[in-house]
Amino acid sequence: MQEKETPMLPGSTPVPPRLLRALSEPLLNQRGSSFKALIDDVTDGVKYAYQTNNDVLILPSSGTGGMEAAIVNFLSPGDKVLALSIGAFGDRFATIAQTHGCIVDKVDFPWGAAVDLQVVRERLAADVHKEYKAILVTHNETATGVCNDLQGLGQVRGDHPALILVDSVSALGVMEVKTDEWGLDVIVTAAQKGFLIPPGVCFVSVSPRAWAAYERSTSPKFYWDLGSAKKFLEKGQTPVTPAIPQLAGLREALKLFQEKGLDHIFAKQIYLRDITRAGVKALGLKPLADDAVASAAVTAVWAPAGIEARAINRKMREDYNVVLAGGQKKLENKIFRIGHLGYVQHLDILATIGALEMTLKELGVPIELGSGVKAAQNVIMSRKGLL
Ligand SMILES: *Cc1c(COP(=O)(O)O)cnc(C)c1O
């Protein structure tokens, strides 16, 4: 028998049983009226999560496909873009733009820090001929557990004509995003992070300004053509075979969102973040992100001096069935990451901190058993009733 696991990954995230049942419903005819009702329903529900009146298209793909769609629909080869990167996923967005022939002006911020908006303000002010066609930004950098200030970015962009294209793959549905109020033109997210369902669908929102850019775009596109997706959606269909089970699961997930309310979901995520950070800090460990920019989806933590992060993750998995994520690229083997988004509750984190204490102790780190758990318990008790 498979052992019971405690998956604490920043995606794919655990699927609640109620959603698993919806995922196993018989397939609908993708050109029939029941499918039309389904796609209309989930499109409305996703718009609620985006807090937008813009169009939102649902595509059969992982999040990276949505990022590529954002580039090929609203930009053209030769367009200049300002790519803001604070980690591995910011690098990916810049690489996709480059792959499609954009001239990428990339600004790298230290991994573990957020975008410095003053730098963006200066770059835009220096762009007197308004050459930047878009600003690429990661909402929540999953590789480092740092969250960028999108509201501030919208203000800094002001009336510069550059579109703001956002990778919010690990943030939408987890942290507040006010698409319209903050002036965010295109936001990409995917199902398997904040939306609680298995991988296979991504979402892309499109502002009227972005549709105007779509009309000008000369980038080749077929599978990713959002204009075509919009036309089909008007008939209650999709241009290619949709991921029908995922959409049935998504309908149920969105019902959950509506029942709980977005404010409740965001508050719960902050609560889970605070429990996690209190626990690891009490063990003398240091999160990469400062409190002010800390992600509500994932906490990245430096391994203690002289200890390989890989050894921590291995022991957590082999001895305690707790599954953590590792570091990516230059953070490989230096950090471990605790995902706490989606179908996760306070006691999962308590179990994780408890297992982490035993793991560290066995690896020779001088910690006191119970000290991390106690700090985490104190946060739980001080905010009781939130879950
Ligand atoms: C998970 C993730 C992605 C995309 O991942 P896919 O594997 O393509 O779904 C992109 N950006 C961020 C910030 C992510 O966390």
Image (spheres, grey):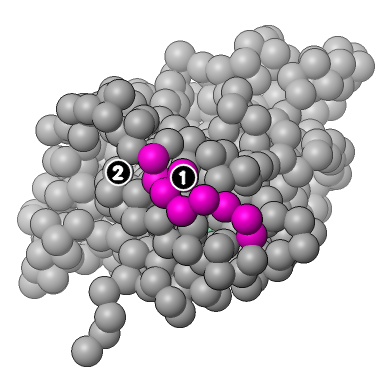
- Marks counted in the figure total 2
Q: Is residue 198 above or below residue 175?
A: below
Where does the image place residue 371, in percent across and percent down from the top left?
Answer: 46, 44
Where does the image place residue 215, in percent across and percent down from the top left?
Answer: 59, 36
Residue at position x 57%, y 33% from top?
294
Identify the residue position indicated by label 1 in the image: 372
Where does the image place residue 106, in percent across and percent down from the top left?
Answer: 84, 40
**Where the C terminus falls, by quadrant?**
top left
Residue at position x 70%, y 13% from top?
156
Decide whether the magenta segment is chiefly helix, strand or loop.
loop
Residue 2 sits in which quadrant?
Answer: bottom left
Indicate yes or no whether the magenta region holds residue 175: no
Q: Mark 1 falls on what kind of element? A: helix
Establish whether ligand 1 lies closer than 8 Å to the Cβ of label 1: no
| Towards the viewer: 338 or 221 | 338
Between the residue at mark 1 and the residue at mark 2, the CA separation in whole angstroms equals 14 Å
Q: Is residue 26 left or right of residue 291?
A: left
Identify the residue position indicated by label 2 in the image: 346
Q: Nearer the viewer, mark 1 or mark 2?
A: 1
Magenta residue span: 365-374
How dense is the environment of label 2, judged by Cα within 10 Å: few (below 14), some, or many (20 and up)? many
Where does the image place residue 89, in percent across and percent down from the top left?
Answer: 65, 51
Residue 355 sits in which quadrant?
Answer: bottom left
